[in-house]
Every structure is written in C-alpha cells, then in structure tokens.
Image (tube, rainbow, N blue to C red):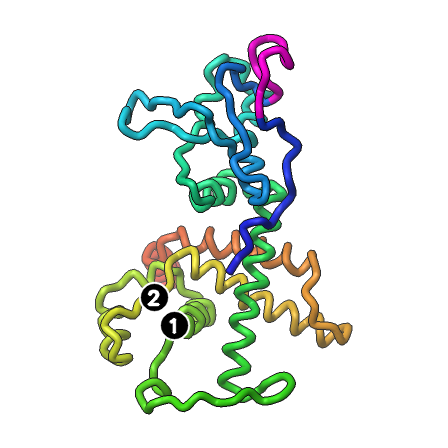
Amino acid sequence: MMDEDAGPQAQTSTDIEPSANEGGVDEHGIPLEVRHRNQNAFTAVWSFVHLLYEPITDPLQPSRPFTHICLVCCDKLQSSDLTSTAWRSCLLRCSKSSTNAKKHMLRAHKDHQFTTTVNELQIQATSTKITAYNDGITGKSDGEPKAKKQRTLFESMTVSAEDIKILATRWLLSSGLPYTVLLNNELLDLLRRLSNQPTIGFPARDAFYSYADGEFMQIARFIDFAGSGSNDNTPMQNLHCIRIRETIKSVDDMNPWTELVEGASNSDT
C-alpha cells in the first residue's frame, strides 16, 4: 500500500498572524482573516492542502462548506491573477483522511514534486505485485521455499481480483485496445460466469493506468538488467513510465470506432 507520507514537506506557516504580513494577505495570497493550518505534519499532502480554521460556505451548495484550501493553487494564481477573490477558486472539500487531498494534487498538479514522488512509489509497488505474480506462475522463488498452505480445489482454480487486474491490463496493452473495452456488461458477465465469481470485476481506470505503469517498469528493468547487469529501477526509468502513462491516457481518450471508420475509408480510396 502506498505510503501517505511520501513526498517533500512544504515550507509554509501553520498559523497566520495578522501582524506578520502587510497588505491583508499572506505569502500565498490568502486573506489574513482566512486562517489555515497543516492538520498533520506527518502526512506530506497536508503541507500543500491546509485545513481551514473555520469552514467557508459555498453559495451554490450551502450544506457542503469548503473545509480546506490548496496552497499550490494559490501560489499559481498569485502570480497570474491579482484579484482579491482569486483564492476562492482554491477552496476544497476534504475529509479527515488524505484521500481527496491526494487526488487533487495528483490531478491538478501533475508536475509538482509531491505528485512525481507519489507516482514513482505507486509504480514501484505495482511492479512488485506483477513480479510476485510472474514468479507465482513460473514457480520461481527467492531464498528458502515457504511452507505451502493446503488449499481446496476451488481455491486452486480461483482467479483473484489482483490476477484480473494484471491479466486484463496485459490483454489491453498487447491488443492495442483502450480501457473503454472493459466497460462492457456482456464481457463482465462472461468473466463472472467463467470464474464462477458473481462479484469479481475488471480494474477501475486508475488501476489500469497503474498496472500499465508496472508492466512498462518490468520492461525497463529487463532492459536495464540486460544492458548493465542491474535490475534496480532508476529515476529515468520512472520518468519513462510516467511519460508512457500520459501516452496511454491520450490514446484511451480517443474513440476507437472513429479510427476504424477512417481506416476503412482510406483503404477504399
């Protein structure tokens, strides 16, 4: 599981005192009366998404007030938008857990160091799962063999949700198909009937991208191992995987049926 404490710590003040700044705003362009703080110094994302001392009402949804504010968003707007209300577009709703805050950073600030660090850790974690799967089907193991647990015939034949994530991702990548192919109820019904598991499903879109990164990391490690005798991933390999991920997303957003129609018309001419 990915560590929530991954990433650098931002150098930001936790309590904003009115006497410490001039002009009515703090170093992020936030009015001094809008007090905010780092709610947990041990979780990196809260260094960039601060908790508001007092929630701010959303005029469009009064029952769902804003609870946090993104300092990275404020810093960007501070240099390009000098209006006094620019900071309001940086308000967020986040629960006590860091899930929503982390999702915001990953989606809105893809070039931020926090995001690149989290992505690298995710790629490594997924690649480790893929390696374990590959070793399992090939019978390869490191060190002393582990004691085998007695399993029933059904357990031996069952395909796990983790296996489905790996196998579905490999099928799409090897066939050059977009993720949207998996959004098919008939295909899902076929999978559930063949596996005799009525609740099993295909990986979510984010999981597909994550496992695609892991597959390409496997390729990068193999190339590095063949060329230099080391299979430790390097920052450059991680960068390649992130760039490949962006390429997969751009292809996935395209309509495959449009490409087929255009290809057919070109072949006729």
Q: Which mark is residue 120?
A: none
Residue marked by disc 1: 164
Residue 230 horizontal side relative to residue 219, left or right: right
Which residue is pictured at 41% across the width and 91% down the height? 150
Q: Which residues are magenta?
A: 15-27
| Residue placed most toward the observer, 240 or 131 | 131
Residue 198 horizontal side relative to residue 240, left or right: left
| Residue placed most toward the observer, 36 or 48 | 36
Q: Secondary structure at mark 2?
A: loop
- Which quadrant: the C terminus? bottom left
Q: Is residue 233 visible?
A: yes
Against 56, residue 260 (above or below) is below
Magenta stretch containing residue 204, yes or no?
Answer: no
Q: Position of residue 218 (x, y in %)?
A: 59, 70
Q: Which mark is residue 202?
A: 2
Could you classify mark 2 by the number of other residues whose Cα lies within 10 Å: few (under 14), some (14-19), or many (20 or more)?
many
Q: CA distance from mark 1 to mark 2?
A: 7 Å
Which residue is pictured at 56% across the width and 14% down the height? 25
Q: Position of residue 220 (x, y in %)?
A: 64, 67
Against 134, residue 181 (above or below) is above
Q: Is residue 269 visible?
A: no
Against 236, residue 86 (above or below) is above
Could you classify mark 1 by the number of other residues whose Cα lies within 10 Å: few (under 14), some (14-19), or many (20 or more)?
some
Do residues under tags 1 and 2 come within 8 Å of each other at their CB atoms?
Answer: yes
Question: Which amino acid is tagged 1?
Answer: Ile
Which residue is pictured at 35% across the width and 60% down the height? 260
Against 68, residue 237 (above or below) is below
Q: Quadrant of residue 27?
A: top right
